[in-house]
Amino acid sequence: MTIDQCCRRQQAIADRIFMDFKYTKAGSDEQLRALETLHSLISIWATYIINDEWLHNESFSLKVAAHSSHY
């Protein structure tokens, strides 16, 4: 699965998280559930990135290092 496919697949979930935070009471069950979901999504992304071969590609690492020095 590509990064683009992952993003598209999670778009509806991200929209739901946003709506739960925007339109529910602070500290509500909906907000707590949204935080749990966000935590899960972040964990999925971390696992995806760690296990993905493109991350370990030397040329990619060099590009990231070059871009990070611009900030």
Image (tube, rainbow, N blue to C red):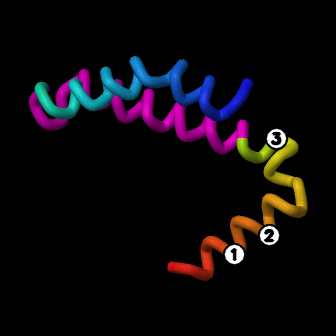
Is residue 8 shown above or below 47? above
Q: Secondary structure at mark 2?
A: helix
Left or right relative to 2: residue 32: left
Q: Quadrant of residue 9?
A: top right
Measure the alpha-carbon separation of dots 1 and 3.
22 Å
* Other-residue count near label 2 (Cα within 10 Å), few / some / many at <14 / 14–19 / ≥20: few
x and y percentages locating residue 49 in the rendered image: 72, 44
Q: Which mark is residue 18?
A: none
Measuring 86% from the left and 62% from the top, which residue is drawn there? 59
Q: Which mark is residue 62?
A: 2
x and y percentages locating residue 45 in the rendered image: 62, 39
Q: Which mark is residue 51?
A: 3
Q: Give the residues drawn in magenta, as a range.
A: 24-48
- 31, 45: nearer the viewer: 45
- 14, 7: nearer the viewer: 7
Residue occupied by mark 1: 66
1 or 3: tag closer to the N-terminus: 3
Q: Quadrant of residue 1?
A: top right
Q: Secondary structure at mark 3?
A: helix
x and y percentages locating residue 31 in the rendered image: 25, 30
Measure the alpha-carbon separation of dots 1 and 2.
6 Å
* Principal secondary structure, stretch drawn in magenta: helix
Which amino acid is tagged 3?
Answer: Asn
1 and 2 marks in contact (CB < 8 Å): yes
Q: Secondary structure at mark 1?
A: helix
* Other-residue count near label 1 (Cα within 10 Å), few / some / many at <14 / 14–19 / ≥20: few
Measuring 87% from the left and 54% from the top, which residue is drawn there? 56
- 4, 39: nearer the viewer: 4
